[in-house]
Amino acid sequence: MRTLKWIMGGVVVFSLLSGGAFAWGVQRVSQERAARVEALGPLLTRATALESLNPQDACIVVEGYFLKREKVLTTRCGTVALESTRPGVMSFRGLVVSDRWADALTDGGYVPTVCLAKSAQGWVVAGYSHDLLECQFDAPTGPDPVKEAQAQVEHLKRAWIDDAFAAVRVALTRPPSDKEVCEGLPTVSKWGVMVLDADLLAEDRSARMKRTTRYGDVLGFQCIPEMTDGKGANLGPCAAYHRITHVVAFDEIDEPALEVTGSTYRGGRYAAVVKLVDVRKQEVLCQRAVSFQLPEDILLVKRQSLQSEYRKQVNAALHESVAKLTGGKLELDF
């Protein structure tokens, strides 16, 4: 019994000491942060006005940017990587940022990579590198450098997808390929390949919208101005294709709409020509026909969707055709 009391007493003492240490640590971090913010003022004024930045001055600019956020508790410069990406634009990595007490009290944190830009107001942090194409934009000249950098990046994203679409349009107007298999094709990741119906790029898409299966709708509604009233719902997916090298286009599609009435249906037939387009060469490398027909004896049962089953089987037929066409070299997500 006495032993138990000693153990319980020890736990209480330990808890009090731990709580006291944490409170002391929080107070210390808060005081150090306030002192750093005050000391950083003149240093930041000098650094932002410099013609060029060395690693130490760049770290001051980035530190000032993060310490403006109330949730950031501590910052400290570690090993700095500073690289010029364009005139007046630099990629910076090396500031350790802590926004959690567990990290702040143990000198932990994360190390973001940001873009520094020389603007009319001096050096500024334009944003995170992964949001700004690894800092591939020109130095801003207007009153809002952050928005200007973002606008440049959005323009580039739009240009990339427009160029890919234009390459497909040109390739499909050229003589067809006589090869049913693309030999010597390099292995390409899914980020380097775009999959779509060729008629997604047509001026009139009304007939396409009546079909049962369509590929590229999500991409189209996000990246094709005519489908988004010129606004572009989300350019993120467009940017994902900036390294695109090939396009799998389903062309010459013949597919009447699948109409289901009771336990019978009409349609359920899909035919197309699968074409692999080399974007840089703007030509069709190889192509092969594909077709699918729902079995006539298929039955409609409760909780079974014929539309869903049909799309699934068409998708499987297209995947098989693409695999044969490319020798399994392309990693596709459609």
Image: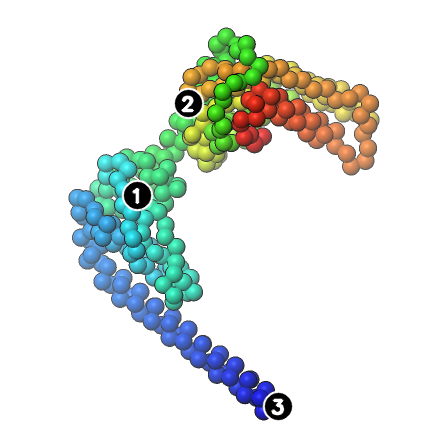
The numbered mark, 1 or 2, whose residue comes first in the sequence reads 1
Q: Percent x, y for residue 288?
A: 59, 15
Nearer the observer: mark 1 or 2; the answer is: 1
Counting other residues with Cα less than 10 Å from the Cα at mark 2, is it few (<14), some (14-19), or many (20 or more)? some
As drawn, the residue found furthest toward the front would be 184
Q: Is residue 81 visible?
A: yes
Nearer the observer: mark 1 or 3; the answer is: 3
Q: Which mark is residue 163?
A: 2
Q: Residue 123 carries which label?
A: none
Q: Identify residue for label 3.
A: 1
Q: How far apart are marks 1 and 3 (CA)?
A: 65 Å
**Relative vertical location of residue 72 with respect to residue 89 in this rendering, above or below:** below
Q: What's the residue type where badge 3 is placed? A: Met
**Residue drawn where x is 32% and y is 59% of the image:** 75
Q: Quadrant of residue 38?
A: bottom left
Q: Identify residue for label 1.
A: 91
Q: Percent x, y for residue 149?
A: 32, 38
Q: Is residue 119 left or right of residue 245?
A: left
Q: Percent x, y for residue 70?
A: 36, 60
Nearer the observer: mark 3 or 2; the answer is: 3
